[in-house]
Image (spheres, rainbow, N blue to C red):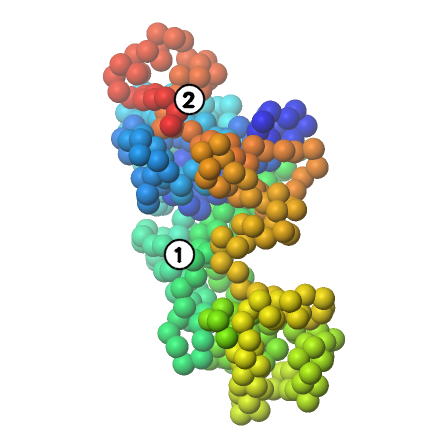
Amino acid sequence: MSAGDIPDAPLAEIRVLDLTRLLPGPVCTQYLSDLGADVIKIEDTRAGDYARALGKPVDDRSDSASAFYRAVNRNKRSLAIDLKDARGREAFLLLADAADVIVEGFRPGVVAGLGIGYAVVAARNPKVVYCALSGYGQTGPRAGMAGHDINYLGYAGVLDQTGTRGGPPALSNLQIADLLGGAASAAIAILASLFGAQRRGRGRYIDVAMADASLAHSIFALNAFEQHGHTLARGGDLLTGGVPCYGVYATQDGRFVAVGALEEKFWRALCAALRRDDLAPGQFARGAAGDEIRRELQSIFGSAPLAHWVKLLAQVDCCVTPVLTLDEALADPQFVARAMIATRTDGTHAFAPPFIVSDVHPAVAGEAPGQGADSTAVLQEAGLAADAIAALLSAGIVRTVAPP
C-alpha cells in the first residue's frame, strides 16, 4: 500500500507532474509521494529519466532499471510523451489543468521554449504551484551554466571548508547541494506554497537554486567569517577538526570513532571513561596545545580495535560512536527499530522516508514505474478519448511499456 492509497494522508488527492530527472527533483517528488501525492513522472519517449541506466541494473533483464532509479522513484507513475510535438504539448497542458504541483529541472528557458512554462500553465490553472529547480537559479550570470553537486559546493565556499588540515577539499558521497538544495529546500517551498494555494486559490512560481541552498546553510563558515573577517583554514573550524573534542580518530584495526563531545559534561565523561581526567582542560584547545591533546587521543584510540571502544563506551553518555560502513548501518538496531530499511521481494534494499507521519504508511519497497507504464491511464484521467490516445501512441508521441 502506498501513502496515496490512504484517504487521510497529508497530500491525498494532490497531483504532481514531475518533469525532473536523475537525483534532486526525483527525491523531492518522492517526499511528496511518500506523503500521499499522486506523482506522475513526465518522461520523453526516448531515453526517459537517465537514472534508469545509471549504474548496474538490478538484474539481467534488458528493461531493468538501475538501483539508483528505483531508490528515488518509488510509488510514482510514468507518462512517456514527446513535448516537442504540438500534440504532446496539448496533452500535457490538459494534465496541467488539473495538477496541483509541477516540478521541472531543466535549464532556464527550456520549459518556456516548449510552451509549458509557468505563464502558460498558470493562465489556465491559477492554483498551480510551479517549481523550477536548477543549479544556479533562473537569474544571474551563471543561470544557464551546467553543473553538478561538486560545482555548486565549490562556488558556495562549502567545498573549501570540507577536508582535513593541510589536505585538499574532500568529496562527500552524500550530495549536499543536490539533496539539501534540490530536494529538501524545494519540497519545503512547494509544501508552503501548496498550503497557500489551498487557502487562497492562487498558486506560486518557485525558483530553487542548489548553489543558493548550499550557501544559505553554511552557518558555521559564516559565523567564523563574521568573527574573524575570514573563514578558518580547512580542518581548523569547530566542526572540522579544529578542536580535540570534535573529530574522527583511527582505531587499531583501521576503523574510526566519531568524537562529538562538544558539551563539557560529555567531554568530561569521555575523559573519565578513558581514565585521562588530565585531558579535560584541553577540550577546546587550539594551536600546539590542541595538537598535543589530539595526539594523545589518537594514541589512546589507536591502542585497541573499534569493538573495544564500542563496548567500553556503550554505557557512557559522551557522544562517541563508531563510524559504520553502510552494510553495518543497514543492520544497526536503531535503524531496524525505526524501520528505516526495507527489503524488496528480489532481495534489494530501500530506504524509508526520513520522517514518520502518523497514519501514513508508504510502500517503502514499492516499485518505481517503467518508462511510460501508466501513459494510457494518465491520459484517460485527463479526459482524452480512447481514439485520441491511440492516435498519439500510433504517431510515437506517447509511449507505453510494461513495468520493469
Taking the view exactly as shown, the residue that stands out farthest to the right is: 265
Residue 149 - label: 1
Please name the residue shown 65% across and 82% down the image. 283
Q: Is residue 169 visible?
A: yes
Q: Are marks 2 and 1 in contact (CB under 8 Å)?
A: no
Q: Secondary structure at mark 1?
A: helix
Decide which of 398, 315 is in the foreground and name it: 315
**Does 338 sit above or below residue 284?**
above
Image coords of residue 88 (percent x, y): 33, 23
x%, y% of residue 229?
52, 81
Residue located at (53% from left, 92% from top): 288
Q: Which residue is mark 2?
A: 374
* Residue closer to the observer: 17 or 229: 17
* Mark 2 residue type: Asp
Q: Which mark, by number, is residue 56?
A: none
Secondary element type, mark 2: loop
- Side (left or right) of 344 relative to 372: right
Q: Is residue 269 left or right of residue 187?
A: right
Vertical placement of 61 versus 312: above or below? above
Whole-angstrom CA distance, mark 2 to mark 1, is: 31 Å
